[in-house]
Image (spheres, rainbow, N blue to C red):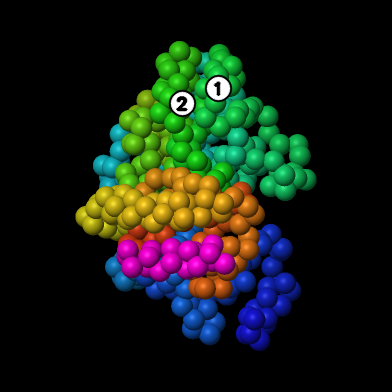
Amino acid sequence: MTKAFDAIVERENKLLCNTYGRYPLAVSKAQGCHLYDLEGQEYLDLLSGIAVCSLGHSRPELADVMNEQARKLVHVSNLFYQNEQLDLAERLLDTCAADKVFFCNSGAEANEGAIKLARRYSSKVAGRDACEIVTLERSFHGRTLCTLTATGQKGLIKDGFAPLPSGFSTVPFDDVAALETAVGPQTCAIMIEMIQGEGGIRPLSEEYVRTVERLREKYGLLVIVDEVQTGMCRTGRFWAHQHYGLVPDIFTSAKALANGLPMGAVLTSDEVARGFEPGSHATTFGGGAVVSAVAAKVVDIMVQDKLADRAMEMGEFAREQALLLAEKYPEHVRGVRGMGLLLGIELACDGKEIWQRLLEERFVCNLTQGRILRLAPPLVIEADDLIKFFKALDLILAA
């Protein structure tokens, strides 16, 4: 480590709460699919800020929109009508079967809003005496007290925060029988990720999704899909639920929505949107003019450049490369999971050393569940960059 790196670590230890296990890398700038450290060394970014900067870093068109909008209107609060919000809403709703949208600031806030909407609709509109939300083991829905409770993980993530809110139950992942046992008249909604991200890049099966639909019909409950990580073309469709032919009652978006600016959204049907009314839910900063203008441009680029198709194409290429390594090193690689450019390479052992070696070779990816290398690169990544990564991983596994 250099003196400059040591200095920034010392400065942070003095100034910030200790809540992050930082990577041994300080980023000074980013461009396209690459990050640069304090000495100007280049790293290939295969994580894109955890599926956030899907159009790449420092995208000139987005910088232009940001600059122009900031000189026109930044913030007046949600007490006023604003065309920027409506322009974005029209673009988003054109990509899916939803009718209405609520804008907020993050994925956790979007999921919190989805939970509130589901409960309020069930109570105030549907007249159901049901408030329980069923979620899946190893899911991740956020770090507010409510979304933390919905998150199906144990350990440090929940340690010390008791008492957590009531009204949630967690069932084993993709277990049809367990879901059928847990759901009943008391169930307000089932909340799922089509592909668990933090949980190890685990897609749901078709059978499980059909069961969710059947239970919705049987009990009149709502289906909430957390698309915070899987949405915005990441999996090869604009929304991951479109792979399954599922129409959620509510689904959420964030991460890639404004390509790095803080933004979230709750999307729903006209019917379920009746659960909200003035005063029932709100946000100070959500849907501000600058982030809305940038997000609208993000959607435009994704649609015009057919980035869902590109994610599918490049994802299949990456999957093929990973499967070759699994065949070559069966003692080290157990398999490959995911869709599009959200892939998990499951290692046969603790993956920390392999992840560390990749970082030393200047490849940035993520390690989740201790042994899953998570790849979520910008959707604009080139095949040559992916080849470089897999060649480096090949050499590391060989050693």
For marks 1 and 2 on the same chain, the one whose residue lies earlier in the sequence: 1
The residue furthest left is 304
Name the quadrant of the N terminus: bottom right
In the shown orientation, is residue 357 left or right of residue 306? right
- Identify the residue at image location x=36%, y=32%: 244
Question: Alpha-carbon neighbours of circle 1 within 10 Å: few (<14), some, or many (≥20)?
Answer: many
**Residue occupying the point 46% across, 26% down:** 208
Numbered circle sitting on residue 179: 1
Residue flagged by tag 1: what amino acid is it?
Leu
Position of 170 relative to 301 (above/below): above
The percent coordinates of residue 128 (x first, y second) are 52, 16
Determine which of the numbered discs, if any, sits on residue 208 in the image. 2
Q: Secondary structure at mark 2?
A: helix
Determine the image quadrant of residue 253.
Answer: top left
Determine whether, in the image, residue 284 is placed left or right of residue 81.
right
Residue 275 is at least partly visible in this image: no
Task: Please provide percent x and percent y for residue 368.
Answer: 58, 52
34 and 267: which one is in front? 34
Q: Nearer the viewer, residue 34 or 384?
A: 384
Say few, some or many: other residues with alpha carbon within 10 Å of mark 2 (under 14 / 14 to 19 / 20 or more). Answer: some
Q: Which residues are magenta?
A: 382-399
